[in-house]
Amino acid sequence: MAAAIPLGFALAGWLPSKEASIDRAAVVAWCNVAMAALVAVAIAFGVGRTQPPLLGVRLDAVTAAMLLLVSCVGAFIVRFSKNYLQGDVGRLRYVRWLMTVIATVTTLVIANNLLVMALAWTATGLALHHLLTYYNERIPALVAAHKKFLVSRLADLCMLVGLGLVYGSIGSLDLDIIATHVGTLAILPPSLHAAALLFAAAACLKSAQLPFHGWLIQVMEAPTPVSALLHAGVVNIGGFVLIRLAPVMVHAPAAQSLLVVVGATTAAIAALVTMTRVSIKVSLAWSTAAQMGFMLVQCGLGLWHLAMLHLIAHSLYKAHAFLSSGSTVHAWRVQSLTRGGVLLTTRRLLLSVTAIFVLLSGGVFAISEAGILNIEQHPAVPMVFLLLAFSLAPMVGTSFGSGAKMFFAVAVRSVGAVVLYFVWHVGATQFFNLPKESEPSVPRWAFVAAVFAALFAVQIAVQLRPNAAFVRRLHPWLFGGGYLDERFTRITFHLWPPRRSNQAVFGKASSQEASS
């Protein structure tokens, strides 16, 4: 049944049809959701977990969660596309490549072989390229798709070399055999260390980490459901591949350090850039880059269960955010007309930090005393607690100016979210068969703490002193994303320019962009 899901998506897109193609795709998508739910229930009750992989299909809790997630998000996007592209002359072509992308992603999710995963990952990018260039008369769409093509091919090369190193060292690319072999080693050989570094680099490249992020920000020229598919599904594959490779990554400190440095830096800079943007979709794109960076940080710190939860939550959130982006604009306009914003002051910040620490400490103490959370078994809890507390403090601080009722509501929601977060953490630890948290690496944790402390300080400074001289100097640099993408574009377009037939068009676009 699990193997039939990607096959169903592929057939729904490529069987001969005309006007009824999107209706058939919607029916198949919802049938696949039902099958994915049945597979998840079966796996939850232990069916197939102890059996060797059949047809190369891996049956575990990660497969169950991801298969259901991808099927549901795909079904919602297909349903949204039915209305979004009504009357569009290229709808048949759109449906074919949309269903191909979902089919390749579900193939990657259920695969028990690294080569199959790598091929499915590559096929996903190639199929997505046709969706990103759906409006092929739009120059920005072609530029962004070309940059993504270059970055993806570099990531594919990293994966290919890594696969060769793994096969040369172990003699197999099956995930079960790799995990068993690595478990018998006291220390990884240099070849597997190099392979882990290459896998980490591939994940960073395809997760739009700095300075390879520009294509993610500029693919807004594609239809809105394509943006939802990209941000809610395709860009998360890097984190999923790392989770699959967790048995190898936990023994590769260099690869984990790479993930922490790249992920934390991207998360901090992208979060600051988001503060300067007013476009809903562009802000969501920068938010995706930041969220992917934070997910890579979790993988680099060995918090595989939290990374899995983050992947699921981010996919659902971004799918909803993009598909409802039109109503988001309307809601923002209504709010801006009916209620003014509340500024964050130093006094409110100090009060909010004090209040949030007291409230969250009480919440964590309560679930610890109830036996739900054993802090000794989860050494990362204190640091995660601090990150959550500081991230919620500004929101609680602004609620002070709206009265006691608003402050109480925000505080209760914040505490409830954090408590629920830790409860999910404990549940994920028991449900997902992933490597358990090891003793925290002090240098990596110290780097993450320093980066996010700096992020918190800059955000607060911008809110408290928006007219300060350093803020005025910092704002243009942040609005331009540090001008990293411009440098990347110049270098890559010089080494690998777009197709010859489009060079004049691309050259004109580049000159216009430079002059503006």
Image (spheres, helix red, strand yellow):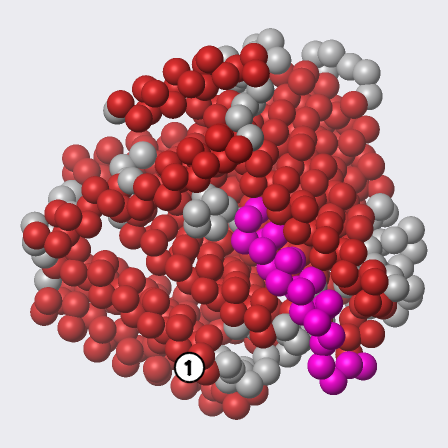
**Magenta stretch mostly in which secondary structure?**
helix
Residue closest to the far front: 495
Judging depth in this view, the residue of 197 and 64 nearest the camera is 197
Q: Position of residue 49 (x, y in %)?
A: 84, 66
Q: Quadrant of residue 23?
A: top right
Judging depth in this view, the residue of 92 and 191 nearest the camera is 191
Judging depth in this view, the residue of 49 and 216 nearest the camera is 216
Vertical position of residue 389 compared to residue 277: above or below: below
Highlighted range, magenta: 184-206
Q: Dot 1, crowdedness within 10 Å: few (<14), some or many (≥20)?
A: few
Q: Residue at x 21, y 42 (%)?
A: 476
User: Which residue is tagged 1?
Assistant: 382
Residue 199 visible in the snapshot = yes
Quadrant containing the C terminus is top left
Circle 1: element type: helix
Three-letter code for the amino acid on which mark 1 is drawn = Pro
Q: Position of residue 323 (x, y in %)?
A: 48, 34
Q: Residue at x 39, y 39 (%)?
A: 487
Question: Is residue 356 found left or right of 257 in the rendered image?
Answer: left
Vertical position of residue 92 compared to residue 268: above or below: above
Q: Position of residue 444 (x, y in %)?
A: 46, 75
Magenta stretch holds residue 228 = no
Q: Position of residue 274 (x, y in %)?
A: 32, 46
Residue 139 visible in the snapshot = no
Q: Residue at x 82, y 55 (%)?
A: 113
Question: Is residue 151 found left or right of 491 in the rendered image?
Answer: right
Q: Quadrant of residue 9?
A: top right
Q: Residue at x 58, y 19 (%)?
A: 499
Magenta stretch holds residue 200 = yes
Vertical position of residue 97 compared to residue 469: above or below: above
Task: Count all numbered tags in the image, as a single digit.
Answer: 1
